[in-house]
Structure formats: C-alpha cells, structure tokens
C-alpha cells in the first residue's frame, strides 16, 4: 500500500513539475514577442480552458504567475512606446479564467487595454468585455461598474451604456453616492466637458490612491485646456468677424479689449495663435486634450506622459 502511495505521489510531483515547466516555457515565449511581430504570435498562447484543466488545482498559483507576467509585458511595451500589444487580451483572458476573483486583473487590465497607443492597446471594446466578465464573477465589486461606465463613456462614446453601468453600480453596497448622480447626468445628456469635470473632481476628492489622483489631476488639466481653447477660439473668431481678417497675434485681441493679457496654458506657456487657430505649444503635458492640438497632430496621437506643474488659472475674460 505504501509503495502504491509513493508511486502516486511521485507521479503527481512529476506532472506538476512538467506543468510548471511548460508554463515557464510559455511565458518565455511571451517575453520574446515584439510589437512588430505578426499576429500569429498570439497562437503561442493556449486556450485558458486547456490551462485550467491542466492546473491540477493550482489555478490560483498559475493566475498569479500569468498576472505578474502580464504586468511585466505591458510595462516593457509601455516603456518602449509600442503601438501594438498583441497578446495583452489573451493574457488577461487567461489570468481571469484561472482566477475569476482577481480584481486587479479586471481593474488595471481594462485600463491597459482601453488607453490609446502608445499608452495602451487602444482596444476599449475588449476592455469593456473583460470588465463585464469581472462583474459577472464579482457582482459586489462596485469599482468594476465604475470602470465599465468610464470605458463606455470616455472611450466608446456611448453615454447610454455608461449611464446603465453607473446606475447598476450605484446599487452595490459601499458604492460612492456620486455614481447615481453620474448615471443621471449621462442619462440627461449633460455636456461632456461639464460631466467629465464633475466626475474627475469627485475621483480626486474621494480616493487616496496616488496614481489615480495623479491621473485625475492630469485629466482635469486637459479638460481645462479644452475649455480655454474653446473660449479663446470664440474671441479669435469675434475679432476676425469684426475686422474681416484673422488677428496677427494675441496683442490684437488685447488691444481690442477681448483679452486682458496673453493667455497661458496650465503649464505656464503661452497658447499659440496661428492662421486664426488656437493651439497649445506642446501636447505632451496634456495627452487627453480634444481641442487645441498642434498642427499635424490628431486625436489619439498621444505622446508619452511627463511631469508637469500646476499654475494658477489664466484669466480669459476681458
């Protein structure tokens, strides 16, 4: 009897060793993938269900291994300013199948997926799918509903689905009260900039997470640029309509009483006025702006993020 037990334990140990060895080889393949390699590289990732069946009860351990490697993979691509993250979604699917309760995988993984290149994979639809999966597995995690609303609203431009996500989340125990307000604001088709400012202000005031606070501050500064560029462009257009030509510079608007001084962006640099159009000097400190992009730049053409300083708001009224 003891001999048979020994054989069984030995066989089990061999199988586990082979499984872990195979996982190590697989993850080594992940490390070797480069952003410019063909999509067929994804085929190196086996089905999550296959790995789940082969885990022999070690699903949690394998999920942690895959999640760690996923973060390393994303970090290396992000540092290299890659524009392709070919195996990010398969790795997330693998991780969350092995451990459906691993909340950071849904939370941070969806951010990795949703953000535009080179900040992320630029696949908000996949991000929404992974968060919906997280909600099915963790219906009491209110932050996932918030994340889903965020993706539908800001990335997929679907305020109806965003309102639904916020509304569902507002009924979860422990959810912030402003989620219901967000749902109502979106359902009422409130102005996007005003709603965004409200949301990010609430996030800034309701979290102690350093990274989330830094992101909220940057988002608010970008919204401020959008508002200021809109106001400035209106003043420029007023001048052009009155004089029959575009202003040569900001001093023309100051002389006309349309501005008090040369306007500065939140990074303390003058806004640029070129051929009657207002834009920022450099969009690198403001990667999320939708207005005032420099000539030749388009939405989604976001540079890497660097540090910036907050300066007092410029006065734009005459």
Image (spheres, rainbow, N blue to C red):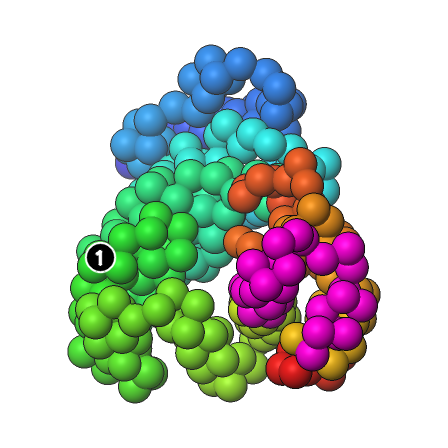
User: What percent of the width, then of the height, locates residue 108?
Assistant: 48, 56
Q: Residue at x 64, y 60 (%)?
A: 243
The question of residue 237 being in magenta is answered with yes
Residue underneath mark 1:
161
User: What percent of the width, then of the height, locates residue 189?
Assistant: 25, 67
Left or right of residue 175, residue 21 in this image:
right
User: What percent of the width, then of the height, locates residue 155?
Assistant: 40, 51
| Main secondary structure along the magenta-highlighted residues | helix
* Quadrant of the image containing the N terminus: top left
- Identify the image quadrant of residue 143: bottom left
Q: Residue at x 34, y 48 (%)?
A: 156
- For label 1, the SS is helix
Is disc 1 surrounded by few (<14), some (14 to 19) or many (20+) residues within 10 Å?
many
Q: Residue at x 43, y 17 (%)?
A: 43
Q: Nearer the viewer, residue 90 or 2?
A: 90
Q: Which residues are magenta?
A: 228-257
């Amino acid at each position: 009897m003891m001999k048979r037990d020994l054989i069984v334990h030995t066989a089990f140990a061999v199988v586990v060793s082979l499984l872990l060895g195979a996982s190590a080889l697989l993850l080594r393949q992940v490390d070797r993938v480069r952003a410019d390699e063909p999509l067929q590289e994804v085929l190196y990732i086996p089905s999550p269900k296959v790995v789940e069946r082969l885990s022999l009860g070690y699903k949690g351990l394998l999920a942690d291994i895959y999640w760690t490697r996923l973060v390393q993979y994303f970090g290396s691509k992000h540092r290299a300013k890659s524009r392709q993250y070919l195996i990010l979604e398969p790795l997330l699917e693998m991780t969350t199948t092995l451990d459906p309760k691993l909340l950071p995988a849904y939370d941070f993984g969806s951010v990795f997926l949703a953000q535009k290149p080179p900040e992320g994979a630029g696949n908000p639809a996949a991000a929404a799918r992974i968060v919906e999966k997280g909600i099915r597995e963790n219906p009491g995690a209110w932050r996932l509903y918030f994340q889903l609303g965020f993706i539908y609203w800001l990335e997929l431009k679907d305020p109806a689905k965003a309102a639904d996500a916020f509304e569902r989340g507002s009924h979860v125990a422990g959810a912030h009260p402003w989620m219901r307000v967000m749902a109502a604001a979106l359902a009422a088709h409130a102005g996007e900039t005003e709603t965004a400012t409200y949301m990010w202000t609430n996030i800034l005031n309701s979290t102690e997470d350093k990274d989330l606070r830094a992101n909220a501050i940057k988002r608010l500064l970008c919204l401020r640029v959008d508002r200021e560029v809109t106001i400035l462009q209106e003043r420029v257009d007023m001048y052009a309509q009155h004089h029959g030509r575009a202003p040569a510079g900001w001093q023309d608007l100051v002389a006309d009483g349309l501005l008090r001084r040369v306007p500065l962006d939140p990074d303390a640099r003058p806004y640029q006025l070129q051929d009657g159009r207002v834009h920022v000097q450099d969009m690198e400190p403001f990667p999320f702006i939708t207005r005032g992009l420099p000539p030749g730049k388009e939405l989604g053409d976001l540079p890497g993020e660097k540090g910036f300083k907050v300066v007092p708001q410029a006065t734009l009224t005459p």
